[in-house]
Image (tube, rainbow, N blue to C red):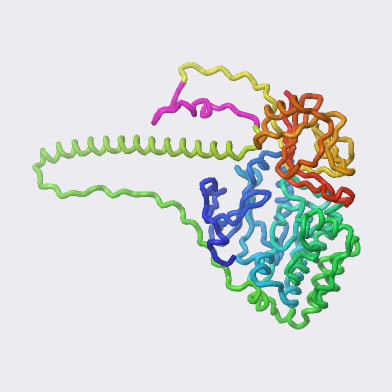
Amino acid sequence: MDDVTEVFQTLEADDPLLVAGYRLAARIGSGGMGRVYLSHTPGGRPVAIKVVRPELADAPAFMHRFRREIKAARRVRGAYTAELIDADADGAPPWLATLYVPGPSLAEAVERSGPLPVPAVLWLVAGVAEALQAIHEAGIVHRDLKPSNVLLASDGPRVIDFGISLASGVTSHTETGATIGTPAYMAPEQASAGELTAATDVFALGQTAAFAALGEPLYGGGPSVSVLYRIVHCAPDLSRLPAALRPLIARCLAADPQDRATPAEVVAWCRQRLGRDADAGAGPAVWREVTGPERTVPGPVPDPTPVRTLPLVRRRRPTAPAERRRSGRRRTALVTAAAVTAGALLLTGLTWTVMDAADRIRDREAASSRTPGPQASSPSASAGGGRTAGKVRRSATPTPSATPSRTPQAVAYPWQMLSEKNSLSIKEPVERKNRTGDIRFVCGRTCSLESTTSVMSMHVGKPGATLEACRTDLDIAPSRRLTLTLVAAGSEICVKHPTGDIALFVVQVKSTALPDSGVSFLAGDLTVWRAP
């Protein structure tokens, strides 16, 4: 992954060129929240720009949390964090910028070179624990600490993605717009829908340290539900770890959150084991062996250079005074006519450029939208289909305002989770921490969705069910119980409430392989069309 062509991807047609004044140089990657791009500050320092996905930007619940967490993340100042330096939750689209770290992730380094030596693991754990101290002091629980979220800079590790994690005090682990965590690095309370605290991150720190020392997850691989079952019900096998690391990792992986070490205790423990090297600053030398050659980062994208044309100069023969006056008048007239013509051509070109860009933006937004939203009427929208080159259509008399639409409006509730402890309601608030909602998750011999108020139906047509498609499905095969045997990631479930509201639940994660494991759940995105 050191090759610049592997790390930095060329911008594609659906990528923006500019975000809030930041010119984008390359695409770095993408995730559940959106895409990540490389850009630079005005002084030339590389930054990573995260752009929120359009469907999340239209979700009020996600944007409320996004604003709150940006505010909290601005307070994080740590030597081992990728600092949040800029953000705009009200931008179009919303975005945030963190300092770019030119180094591989821990996952990439281990995949390339194998497990880290014990001194490097100690430096790693000390740095990540110090980062967690700064994050927790800002009132944030990371919730998704893992090897791919730890970057290895030449002078030590950097923890990333803390800006979109859960604010402390929020007990739900189903943050809107984000995954519920990575199964191999979850804490037991996280896997079983319990309360998330700073101790949850310490458990993930222990797992990340074990991965660095072993070259693979401590709890093994296989289906996610199997990994989660082992995390919740089985003690970790530490015998494969180097003896010097076992006491620390065992303390981090205590089943009871109250028995786990604090980040400050982890830092002190590591410094004690490193001895004189910790005081002598031997960390950079260790890291150079782990990270390899420093990654080359593309430079800033220059601002567009305005095009200037030089006048055409030709030699002229001498002329008499009277002829020079007549020639001067003719030249003035020609220059004036040329300027008018050039201005008209430029205006026409700009008009077509702007109109064409607007068409591309509308096409891109239409392609990325999963559900219909409120439609706003505007003069540009009404005239868009009938324009002619260089002309703007005008009406002789004002057009009367349109009658308000009675079409149900879609409301998005991204990333909702159903377990045997909670439920979902079609009416606000949709998230219920008890079983009183309209949709309940039930697991016995088989798992199913049940309701005492609403009817449900699987959508079996073309993916991307619309309101009309759900109405058709619900007219054909409505039921108050839906078996989940054939449901998988990407399945779409239509629900109709007695009030006339219709909902669409798009499954993202299904964990029902072991119904008695205590970690069965169904997670996905909910859209509700409210009856007018």
Span shown in magenta: 373-394
Whether residue 117 is situated above or below residue 132 in the rendered picture: below
- Which residue is farthest bottom? 276
User: Is the magenta region chiefly helix, strand or loop?
Assistant: loop
Seen at 68% across and 49% down, the residue is 32
Residue at the (53%, 18%) spot, across then down: 399
Residue 193 against residue 280 in the figure, above or below = above
Q: How many marks?
A: 0
234 sits to left or right of 21: right
Residue 222 placement, left or right of 310: right
Q: Relative to 83, does residue 177 appear above or below in the rendering?
A: above
Q: Is residue 378 magenta?
A: yes
Which corner quadrant holds the N terminus?
bottom right
| Left or right for 227, reference 527 | right
Question: What residue is drawn where x is 84% and y is 31%?
Answer: 480
x then y, percent, for residue 497: 80, 28
**Res. 529 image quadrant:** top right
Which quarter of the rendered picture does the C terminus lie within?
top right
| Residue at the image point whose x is 77% and y is 32% from the top | 457
